[in-house]
Amino acid sequence: MKLRFPKDKTPLKAGIITRSLGGFYNVLLADGTVCECKPRGRLRLAESGLLVGDFVQIDAEQAMIEEKEERKCSFARPKIANVNQAVLILAARDPKPDWFLLDKLLITCAFLQVRPVICFNKWDILTEKMNEEFKSELAGYEQAGFCVLRLSAKENIAIGELMQELKGHLSVFTGCSGVGKSSLLNALFPVLELPTGEVSKKLSRGRHTTRHVEIYLFDEALVADTPGFSLLELLPDIKKEQLAAYYPEYRGLALCRFDLCLHDRERQCEVKALIEREPLLLPRYQRYIKLLSELKEREDDLYR
Ligand SMILES: Nc1nc2c(ncn2[C@@H]2O[C@H](COP(=O)(O)OP(=O)(O)OP(=O)(O)O)[C@@H](O)[C@H]2O)c(=O)[nH]1
Ligand SMILES: [Mg+2]
Ligand SMILES: [Zn+2]
């Protein structure tokens, strides 16, 4: 992909951080070379710190990062800046899908204005019983307007479709440990040969095989592999009154009777009317209510 770098501030050179390890940063320059750099003074401080995905200006001779360009956006989890697409991965099994985590990630994407792509991996091991539940969940996300892919890294199902979605984007692959982030990247780009890990049979959980964030450059796509995680706090800027605004399926409805309707117990609520008409949207609405109460608790704690 032709990455649009900021202009060189001669004699410095513009580049993007693709990896950070032990105080050193790999910086990819416009000519395709990678320079391992250390950051200058204040860039080492946590508050002005550098993230994978940051555009920087380097002194190539001295291998020093001199300046950081302004960020378009940044994810706290996984830690990465300037992506414009997030590939949110779940698996049919080992680990079982965490829809709640998916909703939190989707809200974060909406807040950061990053396009989400939902990938349901390990489609090859889906059993009849799982099929019923997962099919209607996934159909609900499609009805909400999201791009949903059903894939298998192992059996090469729908890998070409995912490739199409990646073209022209800087995409971060994210999801719990063991869902197959690295396996999908290997299926897409076999030259990567990323390490993948067995899932613990006893716990049906991944073993945190990927330990660092790294961006890889291909002709038509930039992709980042990241470590898995299972806990995520909604960003402090997301308040209960605005929560529903991050649900695309609730956009464009008529106004609820109450101006400050949280779409919970209020009467004459347009969101609840929508859920009655469209039962596929119910599970995500139920999780919305749970998230709403978490946000209420969080906001109450602030004033205690
Ligand atoms: N049956 C099946 N197994 C898969 C598929 N994709 C990945 N796996 C297996 O799932 C396990 C975990 O895959 P990884 O690619 O390491 O998962 P990850 O998301 O990168 O995990 P972390 O790096 O720990 O966050 C490995 O044993 C893979 O072989 C798939 O489509 N079908
Ligand atoms: Mg991995
Ligand atoms: Zn309402």
Image (cartoon, rainbow, N blue to C red):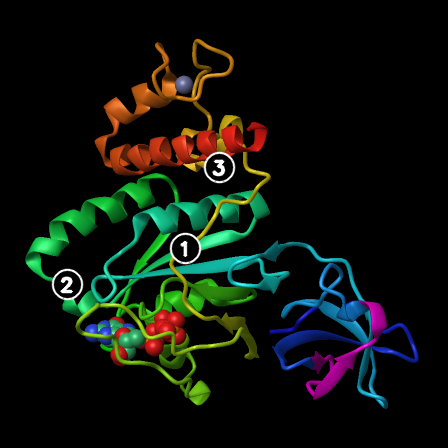
Task: Determine which of the numbered discs, if any, sits on residue 126 in the image.
Answer: 2
Cα distance between the residues tagged 3 and 1: 20 Å
Cα distance between the residues tagged 1 and 2: 25 Å
**Quadrant occupied by the C terminus:** top right
Q: Residue furthest right?
A: 11
Q: Residue at x 39, y 66 (%)?
A: 162
Q: Amino acid at mark 1?
A: Leu
Compared with 195, 81 (above or below) is: above
Instruction: Bin the neighbour count of mark 3 within 10 Å (Cα to Cα): few under 14, some 14-19, many 20 and up.
Output: some
- In the picture of the structure, the residue carrying the numbered disc 3 is 246
Q: Which image quarter: residue 25?
A: bottom right
- In the picture of the structure, the residue carrying the numbered disc 1 is 231
Apparent side of residue 192 relative to residue 168 in the rendered image (left or right)? left
Magenta part of the protein: which range?
Answer: 27-42
Front of the two marks 1 and 2: 1
The spot of residue 34 in percent (x, y) is 69, 87
The spot of residue 22 in percent (x, y) is 63, 82
